[in-house]
Amino acid sequence: MNSLFEKYIDAPLNALDREIFFRDGFYFMTLLLAFGVVMGGFYQTLDGLLGDGGYLAWVTEMESFPMMRSLLASMLTILISLLVVIAAAAILVKRARDMRGRPYSSLIGFTSREMIPHTIKAYGEIVALFPFAMGLFGLVGAVCATNPYIPLRRGMVQALEPLSMSGMVSRLGRGSAGIEEMSDYLEAVLASGLGGLLTSILLSFAVLVLCYGFLQVYRYFLVLVTNLIGYMPRFAIPLWVQKSERSRD
């Protein structure tokens, strides 16, 4: 009975007391999140293709040549979407490994010094993929002169809302269907395609600048608060105790 108690009660609670449980817990939770991103991304990518209201049902009603262009463009946009999903999951795994390798002193210290900065980095690096992907979607649509299938468009735009960039990114990735004249086609390729891709690169760089800039500000205030608490050794002592000590002096 004692051996069972030590194995199933003492050992887990002793591990919890050492608090390494939390560092490993953050690591495995991030890995689980990466797995969820892959599964959810693959599902969202394929979900809009099928069914009566799916993209394939709409494409099959076209004439043969526009349908071929749309299918070709959609194959490329699906490939780009899947690569974005895999890259996002890889970034989460990378930051989870970095965080797990950091020294652990306490839950609050690890959360403030390691988990939050790594979360900010992961968010910025993942979200920076989205404008670039949207620019590639627009380029594919312009070159193929069609409206390609863009399964993750809504999620990408919503992810940029905290940075106030959703409006700019929502203008990217639009197709160029209905073009008949060569001059209109070249204009779409140059403006919507290459111009949109250049804009998306600038937006992706801006996302990284904002997130890493915010990280520097966060670290500055963290050091400021830490030094302030260290400068006040009686920070946690009640005021009446400090007065009583001064009165004796």
Image: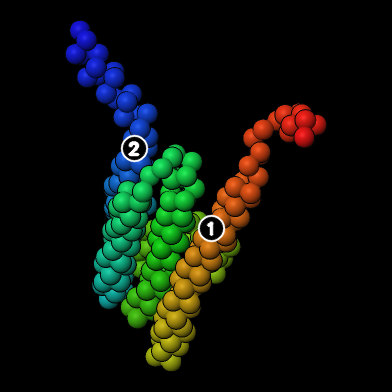
Query: Where on the picture, by quarter, is residue 200?
Result: bottom left
Amino acid found under the numbered disc labelled 2: Ile
The circle on residue 219 is 1
Q: Report the residue at 30% width, 46% height from top.
A: 31
Q: Quadrant of the C terminus?
A: top right
Give the mark nearest the N terminus, 1 or 2.
Answer: 2
Q: Report the residue at 29% width, 74% height from top.
A: 69
The location of residue 15, given as percent across then percent down, is 31, 29
Q: Quadrant of the N terminus?
A: top left
Outermost residue toward the front in this view: 249
The circle on residue 20 is 2
Foreground pick, 243 / 104 = 243
Amino acid found under the numbered disc labelled 1: Arg
The location of residue 235, given as percent across then percent down, is 66, 39
The location of residue 244, given as percent across then percent down, is 77, 29
Query: Where on the picture, by quarter, is residue 131?
Result: bottom left
Q: What secondary structure is marked by label 2?
A: helix
Residue 197 in view: yes
Foreground pick, 51 / 159 = 159
Q: Report the residue at 25% width, 13% height from top.
A: 5
Quick check: 21 left or right of 196? left
Foreground pick, 17 / 95 = 17
Vertical position of residue 159 compared to residue 128: above or below: above
Vertical position of residue 135 compared to residue 150: above or below: below
Residue 169 in view: no
Colouring: rainbow
Query: Where on the picture, by quarter, is residue 135?
Result: bottom left
